[in-house]
Amino acid sequence: MALAAATAFEAPKLGLTAGAVVVDHGLQDGSDKTAETAAEQCRGLGLEPVVVRAVVVGSEGGPEGAARAARYEALRDVADELGADVVLLAHTRDDQAETVLLGLARGSGARSLAGMAPTAGLLRRPLLEVPRSATAAACIASGLRPWHDPHNDDSQYRRVRVRHEVLPVLEEALGPGVTEALARTAGLLRADADALDALAADLAETAVQHAEGEVLCEVSVLEEEPTALRTRVLRQAALEAGCRANDLTAGHIAAVDALVTDWRGQRWIDLPQAVKAARKGGFLILAKGMTG
C-alpha cells in the first residue's frame, strides 16, 4: 500500500499511467473481501486501472514458493493484457536481508546470496533500500489500512522464523545494522555474480553444443577454466538438458564437475528430472533417456 501511494503521487508528475494489481491467493477465508478492500484503497489513491486477480496456488516448491509462482504469473499476465512497461514490487531492505540469510542457510552460491535484483526483466523493486518500518509509517501517514497477513506471523514458514527469531538475535549479538549490512552484501555479490555470469555465457559459446536433445560440453575447453566459470556453464547445461532450477543442488553440480576435473572412468551422474550426465569421447553429455 505504501508503494501504491508513492506511485500514485509520482506517476502523474512524470507523465506516466499507473494502475494496480491485487492478487487474491485464496488461501484464507474472506480473501476475496480483503482483496477488494485493497483494490478500493488503490482506486482512492487515483490508480487506474485496478485489477483484482484470483489465482490457484499449487504445491510445487512448498507453500511459499507455490504462492510466489502464482502471484508472479498473475502479475505478468495482467501486465501483458494491459500493455504495461514495468511491474513495481514493494520488497524492502528487510526482505532483502531475509533473502540473503535464507540463501546462506541453504549453502547457496553468490547468485542466491545476491538476493533480489532491483531490476529483473519486467519487474522493478524501488524500495530495496527502504526499511520495512518506513513503509509501515507511510501507510499510517497516508491513512491507509494495509492487510497484515497472518501467514507473516506463522513460525512454520522459514522466512517468518528468520524475521522474528534469527534477525533479532543477530542484532542483539552483533549490534544494530545487521539488516543494512546484509542488504549491502547482496548488492556487492550481485555485481560479482553478474560479471561471472557474463564471462560464463561467453565461455558457453565456445564450450557447449546442442544436438538431438543432448547438451554437449567440451571437456578440453572447460578443464582449463576457473571453477567459478566452469560450474556456471555446467549448471546452465543441466538446466538446458531438462533439470529444474529448484531441484538442482550444488552437490549435483559438484558431481558433474568431477567428470571434468577428476575423471576416473565414472559411468554417469543422475540429475533431477531423469537427466544424466556422462563423459564420452572428450565431451560431457547431458540428456534425458541415456542408458550409459
Image (tube, grey):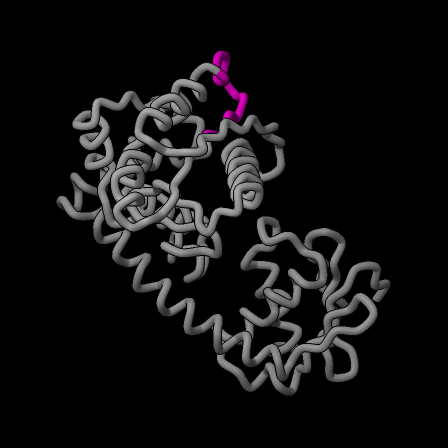
Residue 26 located within the stretch drawn in magenta: yes
Q: Position of residue 90 (x, y in %)?
A: 35, 40
Viewport quadrant of the C terminus: bottom right
User: Residue 218 lies in what quarter of the image?
Assistant: bottom right
Measured as percent of width and height from the top left, residue 182 is found at 27, 52
Reply above or below: 237 against 12: below
How many numbered marks, from 0 up?
A: 0
- Residue 65 seen in the figure: no
Q: Nearer the viewer, residue 287 or 212?
A: 212
Furthest residue toward top: 29
Vertical placement of 73 versus 275: above or below? above
Pick the front one: 261 or 91: 91
209 inside magenta stretch: no
At a point 66% along the width and 73% down the height, the residue shown is 259
In magenta, the rendered stretch is 22-32
- Residue 260: x %, y % from top left: 64, 77
Residue at 23%, 37% (x, y): give it. 169
Above/below status of 141 relative to 281: above
Q: Is residue 175 left or right of residue 192?
A: left
Task: Give the residue at x 73% y 80%.
Answer: 283
Considering the image in quadrants, where does the N terminus appear? top left
Task: Tell me where residue 129 appears, x and y as whole percent.
Answer: 25, 49
Residue drawn at 53 percent across, 47 percent down: 83
The single residue placed furthest to the left in the displayed view is: 175
The answer to whether 111 appears left or right of 263 in the picture is left
